[in-house]
Image (spheres, rainbow, N blue to C red):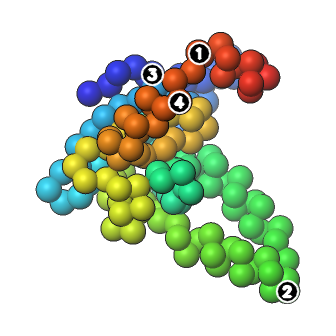
């Protein structure tokens, strides 16, 4: 059930269609139940059509899961490629980060299958709230997100001002 949200697509540049390179922005909130196989449906407005639809999920210290789309993964890939292979500290940090990551794609119905560690980290039991963060999105346990939303009620214009918008 969607409370609000939509997907913007940039589909033309200089009068030419961009096709599969259209940009998806993750905005709004959506509540979806885990099915009996532990799968979660990504809102249709957030699905990447055509080409690579591999997402990367990481546990967030705030008690939820952050999901990065292919465009963000490509940026991460560039940064990782620049990392020093001989720097033991850098290699240890990358191992720490990526050992906790999970990559996945959507099936034909737009479902994803988070691993058990990420589901446990987020505290997801039966329902999850998918929350847009413009260039990525978060997956929260419904109960945790409700507590956070109650504790962090803020005027949208105050948030924009703090972000310098």
Task: Please name the residue that numbered disc 2 is placed on.
Answer: 86
159 w.r.t. 87: above or below: above
Residue 38 in which image quadrant: bottom left
Residue 49, visible in the rendered structure: no
Comparing 35 with 140, the one in front is 140
Q: CA distance from mark 2 to mark 4?
A: 43 Å
Mark nearer the viewer, 1 or 3 = 1
Q: Mark 1: give few (<14), some (14-19) or many (20+) Cα within 10 Å.
A: few
Q: Mark 3: give few (<14), some (14-19) or many (20+) Cα within 10 Å.
A: some
15 w.r.t. 150: above or below: above
Where does the image place residue 111, in percent across and percent down from the top left?
30, 48
Task: Please name the residue that numbered disc 3 is placed on.
Answer: 6
Pointer 2 or 3: first along the chain = 3
Q: CA distance from mark 4 to mark 3?
A: 23 Å
Q: CA distance from mark 4 to mark 1?
A: 10 Å
Helix, strand or loop at disc 2? loop
Tell me the quadrant of the picture where the N terminus can be found: top left
Where does the image place residue 153, in percent across and percent down from the top left?
52, 24
Residue 95 in which image quadrant: bottom right
Task: Please name the residue that numbered disc 1 is placed on.
Answer: 155
Where does the image place residue 35, in percent across and percent down from the top left?
18, 51
Pointer 4 or 3: first along the chain = 3
Answer with left or right where residue 41 lies relative to residue 105: left
Task: Please name the residue that numbered disc 4 is placed on.
Answer: 152
Q: Are marks 1 and 3 in contact (CB under 8 Å)?
A: no
Q: CA distance from mark 2 to mark 3?
A: 44 Å
């Amino acid at each position: 059930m969607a409370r609000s949200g939509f997907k913007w697509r940039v589909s033309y540049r200089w009068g030419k269609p961009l096709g599969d390179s259209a940009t998806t922005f993750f905005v709004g909130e959506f509540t979806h139940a885990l099915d009996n196989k532990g799968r979660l449906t990504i809102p249709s407005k957030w699905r990447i059509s055509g080409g690579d639809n591999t997402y990367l999920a990481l546990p967030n210290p705030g008690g939820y899961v952050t999901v990065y789309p292919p465009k963000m993964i490509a940026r991460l890939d560039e940064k990782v490629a620049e990392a020093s292979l001989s720097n033991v500290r850098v290699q240890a940090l990358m191992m720490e980060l990526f050992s906790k990551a999970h990559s996945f794609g959507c099936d034909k119905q737009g479902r994803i299958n988070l691993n058990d560690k990420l589901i446990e980290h987020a505290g997801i039991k039966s329902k999850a709230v998918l929350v847009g963060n413009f260039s990525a999105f978060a997956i929260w346990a419904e109960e945790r997100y409700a507590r956070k939303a109650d504790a962090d009620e803020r005027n949208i214009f105050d948030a924009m001002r703090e972000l310098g918008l």
